[in-house]
Image (spheres, rainbow, N blue to C red):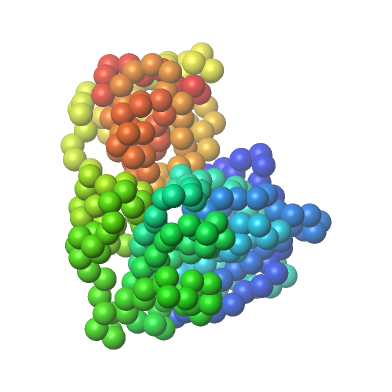
Amino acid sequence: MTAPTRLPETALDAVVTARTAAADAVDLFEFAALDGSPLPRWQPGAHIDVALPTGEVRQYSLCGDPDADGWRIGVLRETDGRGGSAWLHENVAVGDTVRLAGPRNHFEFEPRRGTSYVFVAGGIGITPVSAMARAAAAAGVDYVLHYAGRSRSTMALIDELVALHGDRLRLHVADEGDRLDVDGLFASMAPFTTTYCCGPERLVEAVETAGAGRQVVVERFEAKAVGEPVRHESFEVELAESGLTVTVPPDRSVLDVVEEAGVLVLSSCREGTCGTCETTVLEGEVDHRDSILTPDEQAAGDRMFVCVSRAACARLVLDL
C-alpha cells in the first residue's frame, strides 16, 4: 500500500474551468484560482501536484502558456498506472474544486540567444516539451520539434502545435510509416545543439545513447533501471535540523526511516521521479538512485532524493 503524502503549505484550491478531449485517452484540464487571482507563474518543464481523495499526490506537467493566469495539464488515462489519471478522468468536471500545489521544475528550459534546440517528445511527453517549444518560438531562437506517436488519434495537441510551429514541427506517426530515427537525428544534428527529450523510457534511453557526449536533457515519467547499491550495509543519517540520528537498514529507504522517526518530509512518487522529497546534503557521499539529476548534478553531491537514494559512506548529514 502506498503511504499517504502531504502537499506543501503553499497548496491551494483551484476550480476546473475547462476540460477538453485532446486525443484518445488524453484530456486537457484547465484550472483557475478560486478568487480569480492569477495562479503562480511557471517556467517550461514545470509540473504541479494534484491531490487525490486518498491523500496521495500525483504530478502532471504544465502544458499551456506560462504567461497565462491559469494552469493547464494534459492527462493520459493509464489503465495500469497508480490511479491518479483514472480518478481525474472519471471524477473531475468543469466547476469542480481540486487541491493543487506547485509549480516545481526539475526539467528547466530557458531559451538562450545563439543556441539551437531540438525538442523530442513521445506520447504524453509532449506536455512539458510543448511549453519549451512555445518559449523557443516566442524568443526567436533556432529550434525543431520532433513529436512521435503510435497514431494521430493518440497524439495530443497536434492542431495547436501545427499552428504554433509550422514547418519547425516534425510529426513521426508510426502507423503512417514514419518512425523517429533517433540515430539519424543525431547524426545530422549541428554541433553544440541542445536537445530536450521527454517520453517513454525506450525513447529517452535511445536519445541518451545517441546523444552521448552532447548536451542532452531528459525527463522521465517512470523510474530508470539502476544497478546494485554502492553499499549493502546499514548507514547512519544525522538530521541536522531535528537533532536526531537514525539508522537506515539495507531494506528500507531514508524516507521511510526518517518519517518513522517523526520528521516531516514532503514526498509523493517514492520512486525517484517527481522530485518532491529533494533534500540538502550537508556531509557525506550519496549513492544517487533517482531518475532526475544529471551526472554533473549527482557529482556535486549537495542534494538527494531520499525516497530512493542512499549513502555511499557510513554516515550522511541531511538538512532535515
Residue that protrudes farthest toward the top in the picture: 243
Q: Residue at x 55, y 67 (%)?
A: 88
As displayed, is residue 74 above or below residue 25? above
Residue in the foreground of this view, choosing between 135 and 102 = 135
Residue that protrudes farthest toward the front in the picture: 114
Horizontal arrangement in the rendering, residue 104 relative to residue 218 (left or right): right
Q: Residue 30: x and y, percent?
A: 64, 66
Horizontal arrangement in the rendering, residue 128 relative to residue 81 (left or right): right
Horizontal arrangement in the rendering, residue 185 relative to residue 152 (left or right): left
Residue in the foreground of this view, choosing between 307 and 220 = 220
Can residue 1 be seen here?
A: no
Q: Residue at x 48, y 48 (%)?
A: 112
Residue that protrudes farthest toward the right in the picture: 35
As displayed, is residue 19 above or below residue 263? below
Quarter of the image for residue 189 reads bottom left
Residue in the foreground of this view, choosing between 86 and 149 = 149
Numbered marks: total: 0
Q: Residue 236: x and y, percent?
A: 34, 18
Residue in the foreground of this view, choosing between 76 and 40 = 40
Q: Residue 81: x and y, percent?
A: 39, 63
Residue that protrudes farthest toward the bottom in the picture: 176
Q: Residue at x 24, y 83 (%)?
A: 177
As displayed, is residue 65 above or below residue 77? above
Q: Residue 235: x and y, percent?
A: 30, 20
Can residue 315 be seen here?
A: yes
